[in-house]
Image (cartoon, rainbow, N blue to C red):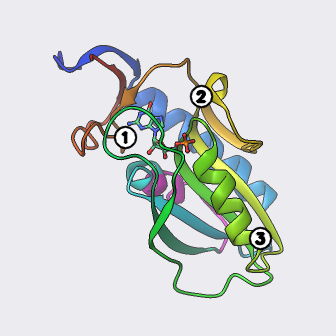
């Protein structure tokens, strides 16, 4: 793995990510057999995780995306959520799996869960690659979690700092 000066250290290598994402895909596929789940990816942080996860989903499913903005570009949550891009179809009666990069305070997902519940989904679960439970401010409980992380700002594999580093194939702690 190349030395990267913006990283304090690498947390999860490409191989570790691939292994865990494959496990999540198998678990979710087993849970949703015959249910035609709708996987809602939350842009932009989900992109690499979403695409790798979907390759490991072995049941029929639909894919859609939302873009929410909760951060103003720095490293701390503002708690304010705006919908920049919404779903294309109704989710009434659908089994929805939200695919998110990281749950930190949980404020973004608290807003989103409320929003999607109001649209009449049959069920809504959260699948996040990373969970940072020590920072939680909202009552959200992801059912599918890739890895739990400490209270550190991480980048790579979709996660950015000021819109940079999303393309790194691994995840590391950002050197502030
Ligand atoms: P929450 O509303 O749970 O505080 O924040 C969720 C969003 O904040 C995530 O989808 C992600 O975009 C951003 N976020 C939270 N923690 C981190 C982090 O450690 N690194 C990066 N790059 N983004 C984070």
Q: How many marks?
A: 3
> Does 107 sit above or below residue 32?
above
Check mark 2 vs ligand 1: CB closer than 8 Å? yes or no.
Answer: yes
Check mark 1 vs ligand 1: CB closer than 8 Å? yes or no.
Answer: yes
Residue occupying the point 40% across, 49% down: 45
Which residue is under mark 3? 117
Q: Sequence order check: which comes first, mark 3 or mark 2?
A: 3
Q: Sequence order check: which comes first, mark 2 or mark 1?
A: 2
**Toward the viewer: 13 or 10?**
10
**Residue 51 falls inside the magenta stretch:** yes
Q: Quadrant of the C terminus?
A: top left
- Which circle, 3 or 1, is nearer the viewer? 3
CA separation, marks 3 and 1?
27 Å
Please state the horizontal and vertical placement of residue 24, each as a whole percent of the image: 64, 44
CA separation, marks 3 and 2?
24 Å
Please state the horizontal and vertical placement of residue 64, each as a whole percent of the image: 52, 74
Which residue is under mark 2? 132
Q: Quadrant of the N terminus?
A: top left
> Does 109 sit above or below residue 65?
above
Residue 76 bears which disc, if any?
none
Residue 159 bears which disc, if any?
1
CA separation, marks 2 and 1?
14 Å
- Magenta span of residues: 50-60
Asked where in the image residue 94 lies, by quadrant, the reply is bottom right
> Does 126 sit above or below residue 102?
below
**Toward the viewer: 46 or 69?**
69
Q: Sequence order check: which comes first, mark 3 or mark 1?
A: 3
Q: Which secondary structure, mark 1? A: loop
**Residue 85 in the figure: left or right of residue 29:** left
> Does 154 sit above or below residue 51?
above
């Amino acid at each position: 793995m190349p030395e990267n000066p913006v990283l304090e250290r690498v947390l999860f290598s490409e191989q570790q990510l691939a292994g865990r994402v494959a496990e999540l895909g198998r678990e979710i596929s087993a849970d949703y057999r015959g249910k035609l789940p709708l996987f809602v990816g939350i842009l932009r942080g989900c992109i690499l995780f979403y695409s790798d996860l979907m390759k490991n989903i072995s049941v029929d499913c639909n894919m859609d995306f939302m873009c929410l903005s909760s951060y103003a570009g720095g490293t701390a949550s503002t708690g304010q959520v705006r919908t920049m891009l919404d779903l294309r179809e109704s989710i009434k009666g659908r089994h929805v799996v939200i695919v998110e990069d990281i749950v930190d305070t949980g404020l973004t997902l608290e807003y989103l869960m409320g929003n999607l519940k109001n649209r009449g989904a049959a069920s809504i679960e959260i699948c996040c690659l990373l969970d940072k439970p020590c920072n939680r401010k909202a009552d959200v409980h992801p059912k599918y979690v890739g890895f739990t992380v400490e209270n550190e700002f991480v980048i790579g594999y979709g996660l950015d700092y000021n819109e940079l580093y999303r393309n790194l194939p691994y995840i590391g702690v950002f050197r502030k």
